[in-house]
Amino acid sequence: MPSKTVAVGSSVGLHARPAQLIAEAAEELDAEVLIGISGQEPVDASSSLMIMTLGAACGDRVEVSSDDQVALDTIVALVEKDLDA
């Protein structure tokens, strides 16, 4: 599965609001998208609760994976943005 490693851009990390926005976007995509931290099992990006369990803070590097390039690029772009601004 193709993947890309990116830094979390939200000042609060992947907490409530950023996780919700990422999950909503992932849910609208017609593809499986996973997000994870190196050394941990990746989680379903369409679940805000699962995203929050990663405990990713601002600047932490996470890996986003999907077989669909558009889905991958969409979620990567959201992870990189400060969604809590």
Image (spheres, helix red, strand yellow):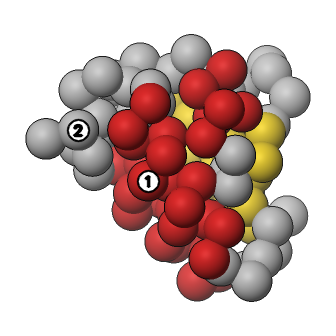
Assess disc 2: are there few (<14), some (14-19) or many (≥20) residues with their C-alpha within 10 Å of its C-alpha. some
Residue 27 visible to an observer of this rendering: yes
| Residue 21 rendering spot, x and y as whole percentages | 44, 53
Position of residue 30 relative to residue 49, above or below, is below
Assess disc 1: are there few (<14), some (14-19) or many (≥20) residues with their C-alpha within 10 Å of its C-alpha. some
| Residue 84 rendering spot, x and y as whole percentages | 23, 38
Q: Earlier in the sequence, mark 1 or mark 2?
A: 1
| Residue 72 rendering spot, x and y as whole percentages | 61, 69
At x 80% / y 21%, what residue is drawn?
A: 40
Q: How many labels does the image show?
A: 2
Position of residue 72 relative to residue 52, above or below, is below
The image quarter containing residue 70 is: bottom right
Q: What element carries label 2?
A: loop
* Residue at mark 2: 84
**CA–CA distance in space, label 1 to label 2:** 10 Å
Q: Are marks 1 and 2 in contact (CB under 8 Å)?
A: no
At x 53% / y 67%, what residue is drawn?
A: 25
Q: Is mark 1 on a helix, strand or loop?
A: helix
Three-letter code, disc 2: Asp
Residue 6 visible to an observer of this rendering: no
| Residue 50 rendering spot, x and y as whole percentages | 72, 33
Three-letter code, disc 1: Leu
* Residue at mark 1: 21
Position of the C terminus, as image quadrant, is: top left
At x 71% / y 25%, what residue is drawn?
A: 38
Q: Is residue 11 left or right of residue 68?
A: left
Position of the N terminus, as image quadrant, is: bottom right
Q: Is residue 19 left or right of residue 43?
A: left
Q: In this view, does 43 lie to the left or right of 27?
A: right
Q: Which mark is residue 47?
A: none
